[in-house]
Amino acid sequence: MNLIENLDNITEKNILVIGDIMLDRYYFGISKRISPEAPVPVLKKTEEKIVLGGAANVAINIKKANQKVSILSVIGDDIEGEILISLLEENNINSSLIVKDKNRCTSIKTRFIGQNNIQMFRFDEEDVEKINENINNKILEILEKNIEKYDMVVISDYNKGLLNVENTPKMIEIANKHNIKTLIDIKEPKYEKYKNAYLIKPNLEELKAITNMPVETEEQIENAARNLLNETNAHYVLATRGKDGMTLISKEESKNIQTRAREVYDVTGAGDTVISYLAVCQSNNINLLDSVQIANYAAGVGLSKMGTYAVTINEVQRYIGRTNDVYSEDKIVTLEELLKILKNRNNKKIVFTNGCFDLFHVGHSRYLKQAASYGDTLIIGVNSDSSVKRLKGKERPIVTEKERMELLASLECVSYVVKFEEDTPYELIKAIKPDIITKGGDYKPEDVVGKDIVEANGGSVIICPFIEGKSTTNIVKKIKENLK
């Protein structure tokens, strides 16, 4: 069974994440001058957003892989804690196991981002003191009471006070007692904290810190990872090595997994993505090596995004397809295949647009990027060759339907491409039932095909701004004039 087939066969499991949760806040802006008060840049804010961070980012990555997920953690009894709970609930993540401590503050990391998404600096508000005995006992009691509900436990250690050398081994023991695997993303350099875990995942810096061994060469990495395996009595150690991939160590063997080439945009949350997809795959009984390879692909998707980002299972499938140059098996689908994919939408907002897309130009590119920003999944309905001929005349299309669809499928912002034979995509829209239909600015909302369908389902029609002078017709006209 190949990796995409493994992903296709993933079913919903119930996964528990234990760890330090926080908020990641971003202020975006433009910096064009130095402050007269001090030699520092002035950032003029243009946008802000706040997302789940820390172990909560692990949880949302698991949720995006179509799993049920709960979080066991501690937060402050403050406004930031209320925001965090609200974000968890919005993403259908169970927050009922979270304990509030009036003596703590909820952790929040605020990043200031200038032009070209360059991070200027970060401001942290957090309480890293060890949780008190009462809170500690409550956490363990909650775990013991609820553990049988879960198929997998992920311990995401950010070393912010929740997890310590006394309670973490007890958490592992509780899970082991019920034959539930524990996957641990480690932080603190103490062997005893992670005793008897199923799998431990350090990066190279963490591996060096906990073993006090060099990790410069492949042999040194394997030696240090095996030392960690033996000292903790874990079943596996997975050492993540950045651009050089990962090393998986068991008592019997070691295996190096090469990274999948992709431009690295931001390393924020990459470790969270790896441990999340390992948990998803292992809870679905996918063999460990395939699980690691899928997690590796998922991390590749996350590294190409700015900031803390939750990777969907569809993105991983598409990335695996692109890496193997199988666009046709990836994004170009029949209506039947598309409806099967959309059957479990998991609250994803579906955006639909359509067109001939004959002689693809910059107007198309800008329009599709904007259309994609309105939701989670962008589906493009493409007129067949016969449909284009009826609409545009016997000389069109210039580019065949197969090539037009392949070009659209190559765009990062596009999720799926589906062909329709009719003159309009009405029947296609009726079957897909998108949340949003978008068209270019030369349309009026009342003239958009499918408006009645999308609005009847509570959706809307959005008209994107018209890009003056950019059309296939103008390009053809210009070519003909130049040939005279």
Image (tube, grey):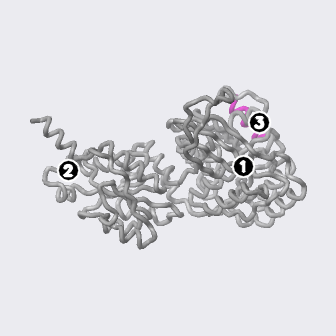
**What percent of the width, then of the height, locates residue 342?**
45, 63
| Picture disc at residue 227 | 3
Mark 3 and mark 2 lie on one chain; the one further toward the N terminus is: 3
Res 392 quadrant in image: bottom left
**What percent of the width, then of the height, locates residue 477?**
17, 43
Asked if residue 107 lies left or right of residue 332, the reply is right
Q: Which residues are magenta?
A: 220-230
Q: Secondary structure at mark 3?
A: helix
Q: Are marks 1 and 3 in contact (CB under 8 Å)?
A: no
| Picture disc at residue 309 | none
Asked if residue 191 lies left or right of residue 374, the reply is right
Q: Secondary structure at mark 2?
A: loop
Name the residue: 21% across, 59% down. 387
Name the residue: 53% across, 64% down. 347
Mark 1 and mark 3 lie on one chain; the one further toward the N terminus is: 1
Residue 264 in view of the camera: no
The amino acid on which the numbered mark 3 sits, given as a three-letter code, is Asn
Mark 2 and mark 1 lie on one chain; the one further toward the N terminus is: 1
> In the image, is residue 386 above or below residue 254?
below
Q: Which residue is mark 1?
A: 156
* Dot 3 crowding, Cα within 10 Å, few <14, some 14–19, many 20+: some
Q: Which residue is mark 2?
A: 397
* Dot 1 crowding, Cα within 10 Å, few <14, some 14–19, many 20+: many
Residue at mark 1 to residue at mark 3: CA–CA distance? 21 Å
Residue 163 falls within the magenta-colored stretch = no
Residue 222 falls within the magenta-colored stretch = yes
| Magenta segment main secondary structure | helix
Res 11 quadrant in image: bottom right
Asked if residue 83 lies left or right of residue 390, the reply is right
> In the image, is residue 50 above or below residue 444?
above
Q: Secondary structure at mark 1?
A: strand
The amino acid on which the numbered mark 2 sits, given as a three-letter code, is Pro
